[in-house]
Image (spheres, grey):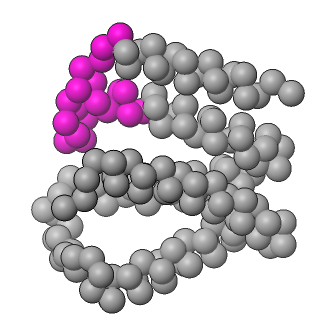
Amino acid sequence: MITRIALLILVALGGVGLTLQMAWNSRLRAATGSAVLTTIISIVVTLISLALVWASGATSRGSVPTFNSLPKWAWFGGVFAGYYLVASLIAIPKLGVAVVFSLVIAGQMLGALLLDSTGAFGVNQISLNPGRIVGTVLLLAGVILIQKR
């Protein structure tokens, strides 16, 4: 079983990976001249990588549920991955990687607080508390400070 510290490290490494992905995709976008084409290439590479991991048996194979067995919205999470990649690729040359990621993290934090506090889409409901509010305000202050040039 994976320990909590191992999960924290894995998630943090995922964040490092996302930063590298954007830097590499930014260079690819300069060559393709299109944020959308670059996103398509990135998603195809992602699909191939995941298919290889899945086929290797390194993780649970799982099964595809029937379309009607889930709420319709559950099938469309990938739309946001595409949006995120295209928006980031357009913004990075103008704003820089640090500003884009600070805005992404701020947006994620606000969205996460909303989902946690309401329990929307089946996530576990976690009430707002002063620590969460202060932490989010500090994070938003960091977004503002990072943008100063």
Residue 120 image offset from top left, x and y in percent: 25, 35
Residue 81 image offset from top left, x and y in percent: 50, 57
The chief SS type of the magenta part is helix
Res 36 seen here? no
Residue 2 horizontal side relative to residue 78, left or right: left
Report the residue at 79% width, 66% height from top.
Answer: 27
Report the residue at 20% width, 30% height from top.
Answer: 125
Q: Which residues are magenta?
A: 111-130
Res 48 seen here? yes
Report the residue at 20% width, 67% height from top.
Answer: 67
Residue 73 image offset from top left, x and y in percent: 30, 51
Residue 13 image offset from top left, x and y in percent: 50, 56
Residue 73 horizontal side relative to residue 107, left or right: left
Work out which quarter of the rendered image holds the C terminus and state it.
Answer: top right
**Quarter residue 65 falls in:** bottom left
Total marks in image: 0
**Does 82 appear above or below 98?**
below
**Does 115 appear above or below 50?**
above
Toward the top, the furthest residue is 130
| Between 70 and 12, the one nearer to me in the picture | 12
| Between 74 and 147, the one nearer to me in the picture | 147
23 part of magenta stretch: no
**Does 7 appear above or below 34?**
above
Report the residue at 70% width, 65% height from top.
Answer: 25
